[in-house]
């Protein structure tokens, strides 16, 4: 028995050491270095077993995504708020829904959303299929009457044929959600100058951008990577980042979903890939640009009791701040905006 | 089971009713996905990551919130009620495990 206990302890100890080495490795900041490779996005994205990606499903999803006639007043589509010309967001501090009514939170950019563990700022939706119908159903957003919408879609032979080809005969809410999710999984940011540099192109980043990357991952300087982890620049976690909130009716964020103290005012860590394309920033859209984002994190959080324990007070020179911003610009993807679909008339 | 460290000696545990277990939080995962223990046993949740974790359960069987704590710290929960207890990290929702408490 003693031998068994010793074996267990020794084996576990060895494994712990191995993991410690793997997670605390030091970076060698040279283009293509092996220590940096975990910043590259995976080649493939996980798909649900019952909704594998096909060209037909993606094409159908794209039509539905861009069709403004699906909204109750036939003038609002998914793309109204998730506009590819504005980084798959809307350029507004907070979204505007049905009849232009302001929504409580900013429109999240859709880059790499298929890699998210949970969807929405508060993580209330588990999958893209689960999420897709929520803004449609919300009376403050697309305010869709689903029977009316399905009847509308069914009135076009092209749509009926597209559903049959992609899934099977008949238009259903479930198939609409699946097709939208299939299209959203194609919105990927993995082809930036930063990616080229990680792959070995030493000329892909400027000196300031490389310096900004060093500051970004340095826990004693920018401390950004504590939450913006590789490869998608997110820990898929929820944090209260100390944004000022209205005292009368604060948005408690993730706390609405999980009643745990640390989640009061906590929101999902957004990916930073292609982040420069989707200003303004934060869940409440209060940072107009990346400089204001940096200014927020340069505050003294010492006396803010509700703030995430991941945050700590950081000090950067004006030059270092600009270098981190320059680095963030290097995360902008160069993939072309998809061609717009031809909608059935 | 390979990461589960039984910190009490097996020899001692055969003489005592209650056992103590350690579950690690490492690389944003719990070291086990499911464990079965007996009523009265204690689990020590140790944070071995460089980042904070916040272990909690909202299960009907047993509710607890261990708060946020950094690398190297460990907080314990004694399981007194038989049933399944779903355990998560509040900060990192991908961290999930089940503790099956037997009579």
Image (tube, coloured by chain):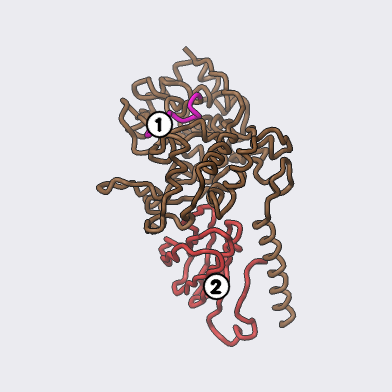
Chain colours: A brown, B red
Q: Measuring 46% from the left and 54% from the top, which residue is drawn there?
A: A313
Where is residue B84 drawn, in percent x and y? 49, 65
Magenta highlight on residue A88: yes
Q: Do marks 1 and 2 share a chain?
A: no
Residue farthest to the bottom? B15
Q: Which residues are magenta?
A: A85-94
* Cα–Cα span, label 1 and label 2: 45 Å
Where is residue A311 drawn, in percent x and y? 47, 54
In the depicted structure, whether residue A207 falls above or below residue A55: below
Which numbered dot is residue A136? 1
Q: Quadrant of the N terminus of chain A?
A: bottom right
Q: How many marks?
A: 2
Which numbered dot is residue A34? none
Q: Measuring 61% from the left and 27% from the top, which residue is drawn there?
A: A334
Q: Measuring 57% from the left and 19% from the top, which residue is drawn there?
A: A339
Which numbered dot is residue B37? 2
Residue farthest to the top? A345
Q: Chain of mark 1?
A: A
Where is residue B16 drawn, in percent x and y? 56, 85
Secondary structure at numbered mark 1: helix
In the depicted structure, whether residue A325 falls above or below residue A306: above
């Amino acid at each position: 028995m003693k031998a068994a206990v010793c074996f267990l302890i020794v084996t576990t100890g060895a494994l712990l050491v191995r993991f410690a080495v793997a997670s605390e490795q030091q970076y060698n900041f040279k283009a293509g270095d092996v220590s940096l490779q975990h910043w590259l996005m995976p080649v493939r994205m996980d798909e649900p077993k019952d909704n594998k990606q096909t060209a037909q499903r993606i094409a159908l999803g794209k039509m539905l995504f861009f069709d403004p006639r699906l909204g109750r007043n036939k003038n609002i589509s998914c793309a109204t708020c998730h506009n590819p010309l504005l980084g798959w967001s809307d350029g507004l501090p907070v979204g505007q829904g049905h009849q232009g009514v302001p929504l409580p939170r900013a429109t999240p950019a859709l880059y790499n959303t298929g890699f998210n563990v949970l969807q929405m700022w508060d993580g209330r939706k588990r999958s893209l299929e689960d999420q897709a119908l929520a803004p449609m159903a919300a009376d403050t957003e697309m305010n869709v009457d689903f029977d009316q919408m399905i009847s509308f879609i069914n009135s076009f032979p092209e749509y009926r044929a597209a559903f049959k080809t992609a899934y099977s005969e008949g238009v259903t809410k479930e198939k609409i959600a699946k097709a939208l999710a299939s299209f959203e999984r194609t919105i990927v940011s993995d082809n930036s100058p930063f990616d080229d540099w990680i792959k070995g192109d030493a000329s892909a980043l400027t000196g300031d951008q490389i310096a900004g990357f060093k500051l970004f991952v340095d826990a004693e300087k920018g401390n950004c990577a504590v939450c913006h982890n590789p490869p998608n620049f997110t820990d898929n976690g929820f944090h209260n980042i100390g944004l000022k909130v209205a005292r009368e009716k604060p948005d408690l964020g993730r706390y609405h979903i999980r009643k745990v103290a640390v989640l009061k005012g906590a929101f999902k860590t957004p990916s930073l890939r292609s982040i420069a394309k989707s200003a303004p920033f934060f869940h409440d859209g209060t940072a107009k640009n990346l400089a204001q984002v940096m200014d927020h994190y340069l505050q003294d959080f010492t006396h803010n009791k509700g703030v995430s324990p991941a945050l700590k007070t950081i000090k950067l020179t004006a030059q270092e701040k600009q270098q981190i911003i320059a680095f963030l610009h290097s995360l902008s993807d160069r993939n072309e905006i998809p061609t717009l679909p031809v909608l059935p008339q | 089971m390979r990461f589960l460290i039984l910190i009490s000696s097996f020899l001692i545990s055969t003489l005592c009713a209650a056992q103590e277990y350690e579950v690690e939080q490492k690389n944003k995962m719990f070291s086990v996905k499911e464990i079965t223990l007996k009523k009265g046993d204690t689990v020590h949740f140790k944070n071995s990551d460089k980042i904070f974790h916040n272990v909690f359960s909202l299960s009907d069987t047993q509710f607890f919130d261990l708060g946020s704590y950094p690398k190297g710290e460990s907080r314990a929960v004694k399981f007194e009620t038989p049933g399944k207890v779903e355990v998560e990290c509040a900060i990192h929702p991908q961290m999930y495990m089940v503790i099956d408490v037997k009579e």
